[in-house]
Image: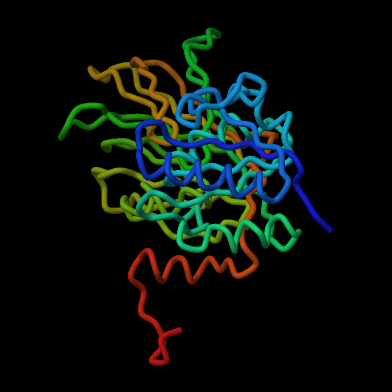
Amino acid sequence: MSRFRRIGLMGRVGNPEVRETLVHLRDFLRSRGREVVVESEVAALLDSSPHEVLPCEEIGRHTELVIVVGGDGSLLGAARALAAQSAPVLGVNRGRLGFLTDISPQHLEAQIAEVLAGRYLIESRFLLDVLVTRGHEVLARGDALNDVVLNSGVSARMIEFELYIEEQFVYTQRSDGLIISTPTGSTAYSLSGGGPIMHPGLDAMVLVPMFPHTLGSRPLVIHGSSSVRIVINEYNDLHPAISCDGQLNFSASPGDMVHVHKKPEHLRLLHPLDHNFYAICRAKLGWGSRPDGD
């Protein structure tokens, strides 16, 4: 049975390859009888008429599928808006790694046609909510699909903080900071910091210290529903930074607290039927293949 009659398109403005793919994709979808609407930021690129344009915060509520063209960064930005909306998300890779955007431009029509025909995989990815507070005042709020990162903000300068999980004291640590990652983010910045690769289906988070002062500080995997609280010690002389997916950035002060927990909304991510997490790891991370090339 034919699926997804009304489809939204999003992409990274300013990338000519993205524009080329968006035009091709729009024309292909129209040739298959689909109604296409586009995010307002890319409407000018596609010379769209006003009735075909929706803002990012609305496009997933008024479509049955949203296709994001770009790299993983493009999908991360879209995910934070789309997770609270109803439409599932499909990524077309025009970036480098492509852990999240796994439709290839070379096989665009064939793979999109399979999805339109109802032949696809769907999975749920959870996001993180972050609050920065000072006393009872909320200073900043954000969310992340990959990770929330606390860092000193100054090269070769450490900060000291206390870590609590489910309001149980874990440790006081001196380090460059702390990465709190979802399974989705475990192949991103967390991996660079020495964290483990987690299968995206796991309900878990990993806490990865950044250049800790003690050898006993190691990545810690906790349940995905755990609440995490970081207290920035008052005698720090730095104003550490907090980032969400490396895209949203806040500044904190000594004595502030950072609260992280799972968002109630999940991102629904579509993949082709041949999607294989371990095959992606082999291709993107240079893992060895079997002698027969598989």
Q: Residue furthest left?
A: 156
Residue drawn at x 67%, y 54% is 123
- Is residue 122 placed above or below 151 in the rendered structure? below
**Is residue 4 or residue 120 the one in the foreground?**
4
Query: Is the N terminus in the top left, top right, bottom left or bottom right quadrant?
Result: bottom right
Q: Nearer the viewer, residue 121 or 253?
A: 121
Task: Judge from the rendering whether residue 228 lies leftward or rightward of residue 73; answer left or right.
Answer: right
Left or right: 226, with 11 as reference point: right
Label total for image: 0
Give the camera-side residue of 128 and 67: 67
Which residue is at 31% across, 52% downward?
A: 192
Residue 221, x across and y down, in percent? 51, 52
Q: Farthest residue in the front direction?
A: 31
Depicted 170 relative to depicted 38: above or below: below
Q: Residue placed farthest to the bottom in the image?
A: 291
| Residue at (39, 20) in percent of width and height | 250
Q: Specify how the rendered protein is coloured.
A: rainbow
| Quadrant in which residue 118 is drawn | bottom right
Q: Position of residue 270 (x, y in %)?
A: 64, 53
Question: Whole-percent x and y of residue 88?
Answer: 68, 44
